[in-house]
Image (spheres, rainbow, N blue to C red):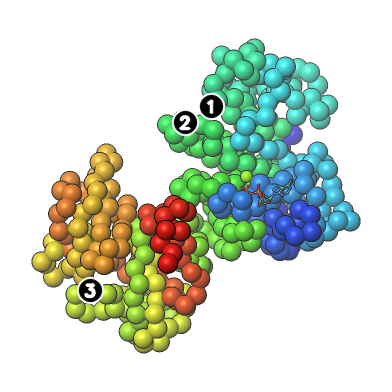
Amino acid sequence: MINAAQEVRLKAVTKSYGKQKKALSAVSMMVEPGSFTVLLGPSGSGKTTLLRSIAGIERISDGEIWIGGQAVAKGTSKHLPPERRGLAMVFQDYALWPHMKVWENVAFPLKRQKVAKEPTRASAFEMLERVGLAQHTEKYPNELSGGEQQRVALARALVASPGLVLFDEPLSNLDADLRERMRIEIATLTRESGATSIYITHDQAEAFALSDQVGVLERGRLVQFGEPEEIYNSPATEFVARFTGIAGEVSAACTDQTGPAEIGVIVPHGFGPTIRARSNGKFTAGDPVRILLRPSAVQICDPFGDQAQLSAIVRDVAFRGRGYEVALSLQDGTQLNSVFSSHRMKRGESVGVRLDSEGCLTFSALGELAPPSPMIDLPESSERELQP
Ligand code: ADP
Ligand code: MG
């Protein structure tokens, strides 16, 4: 039986542990049937709590969760157990049953649905073939590698054609080379199954690669929800911008605002005319701003050419196969990392920098405070020594 892809709707879902600790604060979102949604956030932002609340493993404190037009949780008064929510889950640590053979693990969801023995066995074997494990059906989980065990878990999640599949950082325990292959397998097989997918991760590259929609979580709040391109090009907050990858930040002052999303800025030590930048806010001339630079916004050029807007020194060069990843120091000491160069540069070399307005994301310097950069983070003892 193929179950129809389920819509998932959250209305102001709140989850508190004890009196003070709010792991989720009024999270609302709408996940379209058959779509692949990734929830992205740093450790402790509430990702697992949110996924477990949708699964029914966790009881919510307030709000509503709807799956496929049915309320599965309403405040503390209604709570449908996980087995009645018509979903499957894939965990970071695989969570296979060690005493069951690989095929029995995969067969389990069908067995629980009381599907007859022969079709159950056939479906389990077919699913294992699809994840490339036809050779391993009679083995026990501990005889398999981590990547193979995660494929068994994926086969088990998809075998009963659930309408909703939930993934809790399924690639975290795998080696880097395997992670990319497994990511593609998850994306392909899950999309083929037609199920709605909700996938959580702390890895922005993984989130962008997998998703139709990304939700960004910060301290239990959903701060932005949209297509990956939208999140990348127009991050709602500095937190979202930083968490989705920047080369660095520069302070500047606004000179003019020409459109709702375009302003001019003057950067300290900049040469000549103003630099164009994007913004979500409203600014007037003289406002102090902070520009968060996407790596693609920073272009290395001839230091004496017309293109150069800033001057910099090459601090580090890393060969990355397709090109080089360069770390730069601006005149005032500002560090820019992850800058692309097609050819090798010398450490200590002077270069020009041109900023592409598309990747210059401007925020008010009076708003959110920047967290200390790890590069200038002082150990506690030396911080104390600096005190008078
Ligand atoms: P993430 O998966 O994004 O790392 P979690 O959902 O695991 O985040 O945790 C969110 C917050 O809730 C954290 O501050 C965590 O310490 C807290 N938390 C999670 N589970 C519990 C629990 N069972 N009891 C108390 N606090 C918890
Ligand atoms: Mg987690």
Q: Residues within 10 Å of mark 1 (few under 14, many from 20)?
A: some
Give the camera-side residue of 33 and 303. 303
Q: Which mark is residue 175?
A: 2
Q: Which mark is residue 147?
A: 1
View extreme (right): residue: 77
* Gap between marks 1 and 3 measured at Cα: 50 Å
Of pointers 1 and 2, the one earlier in the residue sequence: 1
| In this view, 174 is above or below 341 | above
**Residue under label 3:** 270
View extreme (left): residue: 304
The amino acid type of the residue labelled 1 equals Gly
Q: Is residue 67 visible?
A: yes
Residue 315 horizontal side relative to residue 180, left or right: left
Instruction: Give coordinates of residue 115: x percent, y percent.
Output: 80, 25
Instruction: Give coordinates of residue 154: x percent, y percent.
Output: 62, 31
Q: Nearer the viewer, mark 2 or mark 3?
A: 3
Give the camera-side residue of 313 and 169. 313
View extreme (top): residue: 138
The amino acid type of the residue labelled 3 equals Gly
| In this view, 106 is above or below 22 | above
Instruction: Give coordinates of residue 355: x percent, y percent.
Output: 27, 66
Ligand 2 within 8 Å of disc 2? The answer is: no
The quarter of the image holding the C terminus is: bottom left
Give the camera-side residue of 76 and 196. 76
Residue beneath the point at 23% across and 52% down: 315
Give the camera-side residue of 276 and 124. 276
Q: Circles 1 and 2: CB distance less than 8 Å?
A: yes
| In this view, 128 is above or below 376 | above
The quarter of the image holding the N terminus is: top right
Ligand 2 within 8 Å of disc 1? The answer is: no
The amino acid type of the residue labelled 2 equals Asp
Residue beneath the point at 34% across and 68% down: 250
